[in-house]
Image (tube, rainbow, N blue to C red):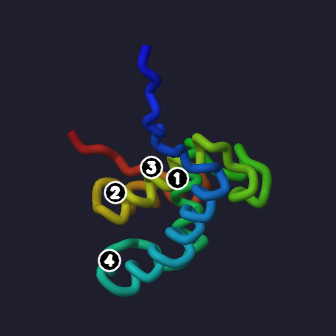
């Protein structure tokens, strides 16, 4: 019997993903919003955090997580948050729609009617 000595790919630790999420929402996304992604509906770090966390939680994040959110995210939640940030940056997730849904959950906007 031969031993498999290959090293499995490392799974990032929750703390590493939280650091990545914070860098994306506090630095990368606001900078993109001010430069190449001027069509985005938000510019501030806390807005990106609200939108991403609401989407991950499926509602107003503080109804699902203790504060501060970044210290209370599960591995799966922060993994989803980082993935969603990457998708938003790449244009594979619709930030306008995500923001609109977040505002609906918060009672600050009405659901849009779908024509059809």
Q: Which residue is mark 4?
A: 37
Decide which of tag 1 and tag 2 comes sooner along the chain. Answer: 1
The residue at 30%/62% (across/down) is 90
The residue at 51%/45% (across/down) is 10
Total label count?
4
Decide which of tag 1 and tag 4 comes sooner along the chain. Answer: 4
Decide which of tag 4 and tag 2 comes sooner along the chain. Answer: 4
Decide which of tag 3 and tag 1 comes sooner along the chain. Answer: 1
Q: Which residue is mark 1?
A: 81
- Is residue 52 visible from the viewing direction of this image? yes
Name the secondary structure under disc 1. helix
Label 1 with label 2: CB-CB less than 8 Å: no
* 59 with respect to 35 (left or right): right
Residue 40: give x, y in percent of width and height: 37, 72
Decide which of tag 2 and tag 3 comes sooner along the chain. Answer: 2
Q: Nearer the viewer, mark 4 or mark 3?
A: 4
Q: Give the numbered dot on residue 111.
A: 3
């Amino acid at each position: 019997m031969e031993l498999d000595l290959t090293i499995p790919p490392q799974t990032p630790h929750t703390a590493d993903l939280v650091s990545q999420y914070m860098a994306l929402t506090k630095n990368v996304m606001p900078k993109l919003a001010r430069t190449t992604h001027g069509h985005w509906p938000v510019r501030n770090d806390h807005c990106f955090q609200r939108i991403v966390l609401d989407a991950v939680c499926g509602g107003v994040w503080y109804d699902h997580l203790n504060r501060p959110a970044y210290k209370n995210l599960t591995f799966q939640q922060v993994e989803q948050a980082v993935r969603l940030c990457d998708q938003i940056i790449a244009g594979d997730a619709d930030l306008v729609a995500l923001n609109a849904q977040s505002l609906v959950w918060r009672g600050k906007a009405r659901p849009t009617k779908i024509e059809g």
